[in-house]
Image: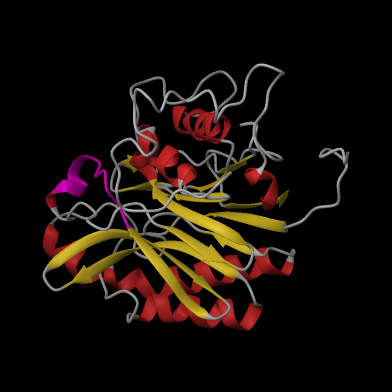
């Protein structure tokens, strides 16, 4: 029998999470986009196969009103930002996940997109809206998709979603190997950080990876924008929950890389001779997808 700890990787992937400090303002959109592409390029130059950028990575976050949010938004996938990421992914042969403000008719969405070497793959519209987001964005209405790609199955979530354990569970139950979490972690009940310098969001990310046996790449932003302080601390959590490598700074722009074998997310998380995480689920008391009917369950 092959020892899974020493077996050759089946789906080796280098993930990069890119921690940025974009600034709100229509006049800053071009500079934000150029800076994001430059940072993503540095991540690829260091061997990244998957590049994950923050929520609203090219617009900034702290809109003053709905009209300002609308002015920053664009169609998906036909807007300039998605086309920019498509060109980047095609040029470098990589997958990119990034957040942007989406305009669909008169509705606005806080959206994450996935693009690959062959173009646009799909989007996720943020389902759980935080604070003043509710004043301009519409809650996502397309469920929790998991996208098949040549490197593995990829699910998306956005920021406040990680506080709802149903979201990573639903993505994992649909067979996600990697969840890309795009974030603008901004405030939690104090203290913002524990003695190790990590915010609660980092622990929620690690916990979600641990209890779902899935990799989670969480890209956050830093900086202070219109009085809102962002928490940084981007990370890649392994299937055991612990960070793969370091956790990013709370203050500085930074790029982290993590080398993983995505196929290991498909191995049964057997912790001892009596406990198997998936078989121990009491689906006789709750259905396999917690009432969700928007996707498919893959065998794990």
Residue at (18%, 67%) from the top-left corner? Answer: 70
Q: Can residue 153 be seen in this view?
A: yes
Above-or-below relation of 204 to 26: above
Question: Closest to the observer: 22 or 100?
Answer: 100
Residue at (44%, 46%) from the top-left corner? Answer: 171
Question: Closest to the observer: 160 or 275?
Answer: 275
Give the farthest residue toward the front. Answer: 284
Q: Position of residue 167 (x, y in %)?
A: 38, 41
Work out which quarter of the rendered image holds the C terminus and state it: top right
Work out which quarter of the rendered image holds the N terminus and state it: top right
Q: Position of residue 254 (x, y in %)?
A: 61, 51
Task: Give the residues drawn in magenta, as a range.
Answer: 125-134
Query: Would you say 30 lies left or right of 12 here?
Result: left
Q: Position of residue 46 (x, y in %)?
A: 74, 63
Question: Closest to the observer: 33 or 200?
Answer: 200
Query: Would you say 80 lies left or right of 263 here?
Result: left
Q: Can residue 20 be seen in this view?
A: no
Q: Where is residue 48 in the image (x, y as percent from the top left)?
A: 69, 63
């Amino acid at each position: 029998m092959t020892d899974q700890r020493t077996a050759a990787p089946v789906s080796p992937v280098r993930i990069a999470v890119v921690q940025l400090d974009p600034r709100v303002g229509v006049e800053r959109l071009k500079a934000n986009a150029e800076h994001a592409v430059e940072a993503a390029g540095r991540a690829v130059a260091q061997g990244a196969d998957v590049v994950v950028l923050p929520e609203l990575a090219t617009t900034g976050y702290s809109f003053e009103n709905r009209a300002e949010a609308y002015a920053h938004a664009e169609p998906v996938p036909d807007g300039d930002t998605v086309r920019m990421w498509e060109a980047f992914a095609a040029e470098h042969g990589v997958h990119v996940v990034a957040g942007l403000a989406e305009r669909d008719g008169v509705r606005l969405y806080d959206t994450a997109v996935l693009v690959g070497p062959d173009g646009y793959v799909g989007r996720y519209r943020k389902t759980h809206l935080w604070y003043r987001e509710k004043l301009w964005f519409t809650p996502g209405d397309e469920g929790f998709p998991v996208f098949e790609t040549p490197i593995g199955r990829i699910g998306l979530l956005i920021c406040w979603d990680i506080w709802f354990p149903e979201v990573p569970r639903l993505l994992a139950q649909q067979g996600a190997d990697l969840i890309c979490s795009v974030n603008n972690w901004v405030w939690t009940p104090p203290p913002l950080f524990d003695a190790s310098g990590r915010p609660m969001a980092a622990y929620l990310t690690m916990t979600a990876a641990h209890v779902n046996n899935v990799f989670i790449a969480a890209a956050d932003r830093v900086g202070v924008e219109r009085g809102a302080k962002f928490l940084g601390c981007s990370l890649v959590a392994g299937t055991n929950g612990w960070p793969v490598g370091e956790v990013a700074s709370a203050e500085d722009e930074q790029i982290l890389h993590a080398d993983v074998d995505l196929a290991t997310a498909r191995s049964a998380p057997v912790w001892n001779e009596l406990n198997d995480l998936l078989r121990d689920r009491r689906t006789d008391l709750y259905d396999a997808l917690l009432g969700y009917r928007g996707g498919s369950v893959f065998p794990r």
